[in-house]
Amino acid sequence: MTVFQRYSDDLDTIDQNLINYLKSGDRYLNGSLDYLKTMRGKMLRPLLSLIGAEIAKTQRDLVIATSLEMLHIGTLIHDDVIDESKLRRGKESIQSKYSKEYAIYLGDYLFSSLFVYLSGTGIDKSELVGLAKLMQQICLAEMKQWHHRYNTDQSVREYLRIISGKTAALFSLALGSAAKEPPLKQKLQRIGYHLGMAFQIQDDLLDFEGDEALVGKELQKDLLIGNYNLPILFALEEEPERMRRLLSTQTDLSSEIRQLVMESAAYDRTRQLLNRYFDKIDQAIVSLPGNQGRQDLQELIGVLRSRAY
C-alpha cells in the first residue's frame, strides 16, 4: 500500500467536503465546481498536513487540511489567468473554459469562502492569522514575479525569495500545521520549506525535460510571458550577452536556448541545487520521531524526488 493509498479515505473526504461546502443554490456555479472536482491533483498540501499529524501524534485536522487545498486551488485558478494557461492537470483550465473574468471571480470566491469556512470551526486565532499571513506572502511573491518579467538582471537569490513565498511557504505551513510542541513544529516547517523549494525547482526542470501530456499543463509558459526560471537565470550568469540576445528575439525553449542552457552548465547547476534541498530534507528527517508518520514522509519524498509531472 502506497502513502497515497494509506491516506486516501481522508483525502477523498477532504475533496468532497471542499466541493460540498463551496456549492450554493446557483446552478452555473455548481457546474463549474463539479468541473473543478474532475481536475483533482495530487493533494500534496493536505497530505502533508495529515502526515505531520501522524509524526506529531496529534489528531488529523481535516478542517485545516481542507482549507489548505482550498487556498491552493484558488491560487492555481488565478495563476492560470495571469499565465493565460489553457491546460491544468490535463484538462482545459477554468479560465479557458469559462473565461478569465469568471476564473478571477471563482478564485476570489474560494478565498473568501476559506475564511468563512474557518470562522465557523472554532479554529485557534493563531492558525487563522497564520493562513492570512500566508496569503499575504503568496500575493507579495506573485507581485514580485510580475515586476521581474523580462528582467534579465534578476538575480538567482531574488528568484529563490519569490518561490519561497509562492510555493515553499504553503508546504511549510502544511507539514507543521498539526504539531503542537514548538521544537517539532519548527522541524516540520523547515522540512516542508525545503520540500516546497525542491518542488518548484523540479517544475523549472520539467520545462526542459517534461512531457506536456504527462505533466498536464503547458510547458514553457513562463518563458513566453517573461518569467525566467532557474535554468534560464543560471544561463544568464554563465553566458550573459548570448543569453540576452536570444531572450530578446525568442519566446520559447528553442533549440538555441535549450542548447545554451545545457552547454553552459546552467541545467547541471539547477539539478545540483535541487539535490542540495533534498539532502537537507534527508538530514532533517532523521531527527523526527521514528514512527509511521516519518516513514510516510520518507516515502512521499522518495516519490516526489523522482516525479516526472
Image (cartoon, grey):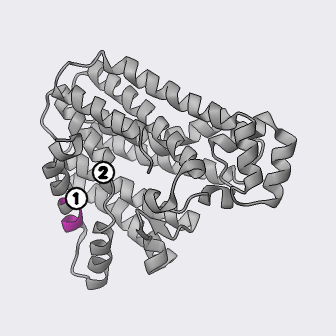
Left or right? Give the position of 216 relative to 250. left
* Labelled disc at residue 40: none
Magenta-colored stretch includes residue 271: no
What's under tag 2, amino acid-wise?
Met
Q: Mark 2 packing: few (<14 Cα in 10 Å), some, or many (20+)?
A: some
Q: Are marks 2 and 1 in contact (CB under 8 Å)?
A: yes
What's under tag 1, amino acid-wise?
Asp
Which residue of the protein is positioned furthest toward the top in this rendering? 287
Left or right? Give the position of 164 relative to 264. left
* Labelled disc at residue 43: 2
- Identify the element where label 2 is drawn: loop
Which residue is label 1 attached to? 15
Q: Locate residue 194: give its quadrant.
A: top left
At x 83%, y 40%, the residue is: 240
Quadrant (top left, top right, bottom left, bottom right) of the N terminus: top left
Left or right? Give the position of 280 relative to 177. right
Q: Main secondary structure of the magenta part?
A: helix
Start and end of the magenta stretch?
A: 17-21
